[in-house]
Amino acid sequence: MSDSSHPPLAPKHLGRSSDLPASPQAAILDYVANPRANELYLVRFAAPEFTSLCPVTGQPDFAHLVIDYAPGETIVESKSLKLFLGSFRNHAGFHEDCTVGIGRRLYDEMQPKWLRIGGYWYPRGGIPIDVFWQSGAPPEALWLPDQGVAPYRGRG
């Protein structure tokens, strides 16, 4: 992981061929200067096909992730985020560890004004698990739309 006080600003993935990282720890997230650093605004990334592995059974787990953040001096480069999220495909971790770990790493490295992540996990064993984390109270006057993911209802 990079030094969180000095996020890299020279993208390593943008415009280049990049392989899927072997693990989340090996993934390099790229950050670039925020072109609107003086504005308060929200950025949303949705990853409706996120996958990881159950650390006990090795079976695949599936989630719809929604990441919202109010940028500070930098923004995350989307290709590097895609590769980072894809690196979880062979990562064994509980839903809570994956969701909170993704949010925490982005927050620590990017240093946005605010960040939240919703992990809407599909059921295994008959129980859906939804995991939510945020860095603190959102800035006043920041428009926060609903994350738009309906609670799991099964067939009904």
Image (cartoon, rainbow, N blue to C red):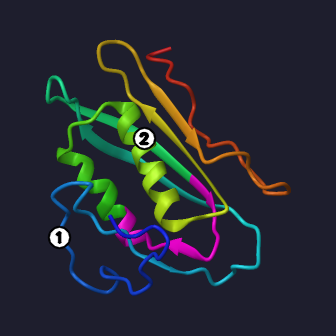
Q: Total of numbered circles in the picture? A: 2
Left or right, 132 with reference to 23: right
Work out whether 37 lies above or below 142.
below
> Which residue is label 1 attached to?
19
Task: Find numbered disc 1 in the image and state the secondary structure of the residue it sits on.
Answer: loop
Residue 57 placement (x, y as % from top left): 15, 23
Disc ID at residue 99: 2
Residue 133 placement (x, y as % from top left): 55, 39
Task: Find numbered disc 2 in the image and state the secondary structure of the residue it sits on.
Answer: helix
Work out whether 131 lies above or below 65.
above
Separation of marks 2 and 1 at Cα, in angstroms: 23 Å
Q: Badge 1, how many Cα within 10 Å: few under 14, some, many 20+?
A: few
N-terminal label among 2 and 1: 1
Q: What is the magenta range?
A: 68-81
Residue 131 placement (x, y as % from top left): 49, 32
Give the quarter of the image for residue 83: bottom left
